Amino acid sequence: MRSSLILVLGLCALALSPTFAAGHTVTVNTVQIFGTIDPAKISDYTDYMASANLYDGLANVDPDGNLVPELAEKWDVSPDATSVTFHIRPDAKFQDGSPVEAEDVVYSVERLLKINQGPANLFAGVLKPGSVEAIDPKTVKFTLLKTFSPFLATVPAIRIVNSKIVKANAGADDGQTYLSTHVAGAGPYTLKSWDRGSQMTIERDPNYYRGWGEGPIDEVRFIITNDEATVRSMAASGELTMSSQYQSPDTYDALSKMPRFKIVTGVTPVAFYLKFNSKVAPTDDVHIRKAIALATDYDTIHNTIIPGGELTGPLPKTFAGAYLPTPAPKFDLEAAKAEIAKSGYAGKTDIPLSLTYVSSAKFEEELALLMQSNLEQIGFKVTLSGEPWNRVTEIATKVETTPNVTEVFFGPTYPSPDSMFYAQYDSKSAGTWASMEWLQNPEIDKMIDAARATGDAAAQAKIYKDLQQTLIDQQTDAFLETQVVRHAMDKCLDGYVPVPMQSFDYAFHKYKWTCS
Amino acid sequence: MEFFYFLIRRVFWSLLVLFGLSIVIFVIARVMPGDPARMAMGPRASQEQVADLKAKMGLDKPILAQYGQFAVGLLHGDLGLSFLTKRPVNHDIAETFAATFELVLATILVAFVVGVPLGVVAAANKDGWVDNLVRFFAILGAATPSFLLALLLQVLAGYVLHALPTTGRVSPDSPFTADITGLLTLDTLLRGNLGGLSDALRHLLLPTLALSAATIGQIARITRSSMIDVSTQDYIEAVRAFGVPDRVRMFKYMLRPAFVPPMTIMGLEFASLLGNAFVVELVFSWPGMASYGVRSILQKDLNAVMGVVMISGVFFVVINLMIDVLVGFIDPRVRIRGARA
Amino acid sequence: MSASVSAASVRISIAYQNWHRFSRNPTALIGAAIVTIVVLAALLAPWIAPHPDHVGAIVNFRVRHQPPSAQYWFGTDNVGRDIFSRVLFGYRISLLLAAVVLGFAVPVGATLGLLAGYFGGWMEILIMRLTDVALAIPPLVMALAVTAVLTPNLLHAMFAIAALWWTWHTRLIFSITRTLRHQEFVEAARTLGASRFHILFRELLPNCASAILVKVSLDFGFVILIGAALSYLGLGVQPPTPDLGTMVANGADFLPDRWWESLLPGAAILFVALGFNLLGDGLRDLYDVESVR
């Protein structure tokens, strides 16, 4: 049965190949360069965008955050949740045609842990060399160092490399040199050309083991530009098929007026926060934090500066099971003044406050200016600084250099509430940009650990809800909104659905061309 | 023989300048606060990962050892790893340098082809309206911010006239690559690919215009004053007395020596030309070393910054060496007293 | 007594002659007029700007992106601030930047040039080779690199530019001094036992004054342009303080429909740079120092 299916697919591929040249090409702009395509080094949004197309993992994520089969057709979790056995699809094969086997998975994980960059931090204290073993060529077993309930959610971050090719090109650095420019994976697309500063082009692998639906995208060109004028002129000339999600409102306006484009929106679980540094004055005072949150003009932010979805606490609604419903925050300058009066700064004027934002994003500066203008009305003296993103990650490493207020987007890196809580509020995450609150609160750490150590969903949800209430009471952040992603897309292109993990929503295998 | 000694001397001084430059760059780079390894690893890395990489990169060694590493690397053309692209900086620069070189070369070419005749005409009509016009445009060119001119050209050509591509070096669907010399215009020409050539030239036009405006004016003014200078020299009078025709006198006896000052100026101005290229490349998304440089500077990519500054310096020194040799060739007096004041 | 009177009258008559020649030089006059306007605008900005509060912590999203009108001469920006008022204040930063850079570069550069030109020998070799090194680095690139090393702001950019800019003055003064050092008045001073300090700064320096003046005027334009380019590239001053290059960069995202947000601040930069260039060019004619660029 299965072999006949393969035969049919193969025939389809053959039948398709004559029309291949006239296939559908999608040109999409991305705002930053692809740092790396090496699965052991990928770290940011753009890296994962390439990886989602070039490599496959054992499992993937669906829009609701559930794990779905990819290279593995199924998996068994041991009763104590400390080991997971994956069964690899019999037909799973790499782009060079060789089968994907357990030893490839073992090699991919060992390589990841050895290089110790990129996704490796997800597995620190969970996996060590030797934790993964091949039972037989199609069965691989992960033995965890401890019970870690979010483990399965992190599995898609392990991109499987072709161990034969990489070993043959290992050199002295485990193939880091080779994999920095070559792809040795099982993904649906192959690398066609890559000019680091300007573009990357990937090409459909017609023999992809999971097959293709109707109207597949044959070629994807990522054009790297963050210049609005360029994007608009590329759209006008017919070159652009899909915009990045980071264009200015004006660009979306301009593109929506062009008959070829539709604007596709999707509410993501990426939350937009004003992170308050709880360890330096004046934001070490909870009343000051509450005052700033009350002096935030949520309506202007939603309606004018950057439209977004509702966010009422630290966790976005996407994680329905763990989400605690709370009333939406309000803009109320009088109440803000009342909070200052309750604080240690009662009666003071010109309370110094530093606010940092990412300088490359225009709306972040607009928000910063809005905050400054409101806060200075109620007695603060606000110092703004716009910094490049790298600089933000650098000042986040020390409590003294972390500003009182920082505008930060944070989304789950794996589809579990744990990703939101651990990376932002756990003591072990202190010193990272996601954790600029510097909570370092043992009670909160205890709750996060307790949730990790239980396999019982109901008990876990209860812990997460208590945790949300604690964070809201402490006003650790101002909770602005969830990010609404907008893309201007050719009306013939379909398939964008937000996925709560990295940039997995740009896996073009899921997209299709609806026009003939 | 005397030319040979002149050459040796110039090369020696050039090497000395480069040595000085390497010290300056090292000093700048090592006062950089912050944590390059943290930046290299990306924002989501753990502290252990960062420390691990630090050791691998030798960033935990004492300054002197790091200097040794830097100097030895430099001699081997090794500029270290870029934190941003996670590749050797010399690869990155090699990839982007050709684009910058092409733009700068085109700019110099345009500056001379337009500037020198303008200067000659201005000198021939000293204090006439042409002269005044040339003078005004020279001043205007020098006073116009390069990014403003670039933006204006982009708006004009891209939106108002819809005539020329406003970004990049080739059309995105273009199959042409610069695979011989790295210069797209030259390679397409060598391959006899006229479609590719026209595409490359269309992309090159606006950035070149934006970049050359200031230089054209400078060249025109210098040519003008050196033509006037030369025309009052005794030997020109002697040439005239011998009955050499006007045209020959103009080109052989005047233009040749008058060519020297514009060339020396070009050499000196080269640094500021390269500086402006940083801005112009960014506006036109020109995939050159300058865009790479600005990006790495804004993102604090330590090795890339050092590499770009170093290569800019080397570029400057080499261009000036070439100009000096050329000038020495045109004007024999230079070989004896040295090319410069 | 009578000698000093006549010296004074000679000085007056020279001044008068200079003014006479200056007033007949349209380039210099227009340049001087522009420079005067800009300097006055910068100094008087708090009183003459139509919306002086728009340089501070203020946003007004209801009137964002307004085109130029009687109320907003240069239109408004993306948070509804009056661009014209911000341009006037922006001139303060530009002029300050140039003044600080040249305030460092000119004295240092001139002194080194005098030393190299007058003493020659190893002093000349040392100083002039140093200028060769400094000359090989584009000031803009140096400023970018240094600001990348430190925190990216305009103050650090100023240090970086100043650290290279002296070379031009050194080379200029060096070439003049070298031709002067064996002239009679220098020899005479030396024979009379004048100190080296006296010869350098009382005999040689005054003879370089006109060249320095021309160079400084031209440099004001160049440094303002470099400063603008740096802030255009993202190394501006802290918001909401207005800065011309940053305004152009901000507005460029709204081209071509909202052209005023970038092109008018850009034109303001062109205006001031043009003023200093015209003035310098005119002065060059006036003092007949063709070699100064």
Image (cartoon, coloured by chain):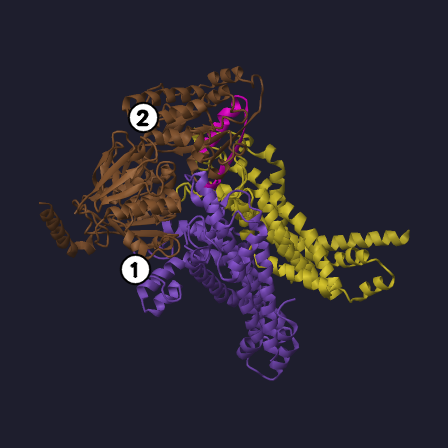
Chain colours: A brown, B purple, C yellow
Left or right? Give the position of C216 relative to A339: right
Tell me where residue A62 sits by quadrant.
top left
Percent of width and height locating residue B102: 43, 62
Classify 10 Å Cα crowding around label 2: few (below 14), some (14-19), many (20 and above): some
Classify 10 Å Cα crowding around label 1: few (below 14), some (14-19), many (20 and above): few
Tell me how far mark 1 sits from mark 2, CA to CA.
56 Å
- The chain letter for the residue carrying disc 2 is A
Query: Above or below — where is B141 with respect to A232?
Result: below
Which type of secondary structure does the marked residue at label 2 adopt? loop
Q: Can see residue C279?
A: no
Residue type at numbered disc 1 = Pro
Residue drawn where x is 57% and y is 77% of the image: B253
Q: Nearer the viewer, mark 1 or mark 2?
A: 2
Tell me where residue A318 sits by quadrant.
top left
> Closer to the camera, A161 or C189?
A161
Q: Can see residue B306?
A: yes
- Same chain under badges 1 and 2? The reply is no
Residue type at numbered disc 2 = Thr
- The chain letter for the residue carrying disc 1 is B
Q: Is residue B21 magenta?
A: no
Query: Above or below — where is B235 with respect to A451?
Result: below
Percent of width and height locating residue B73: 51, 58
Which type of secondary structure does the marked residue at label 1 adopt? loop
Q: What span is colored magenta in the figure? A: A366-391
Q: Which residue, given by chain and number where applicable, does mark 1 sit on?
A: B175
Left or right? Give the position of A160 relative to A304: left
Query: Above or below — where is B25 with respect to B123?
Result: above
Query: Above or below — where is C130 with respect to A89?
Result: below
Percent of width and height locating residue C259: 43, 43
> Closer to the camera, B103 or B61?
B61
Residue A454, numbered label: 2
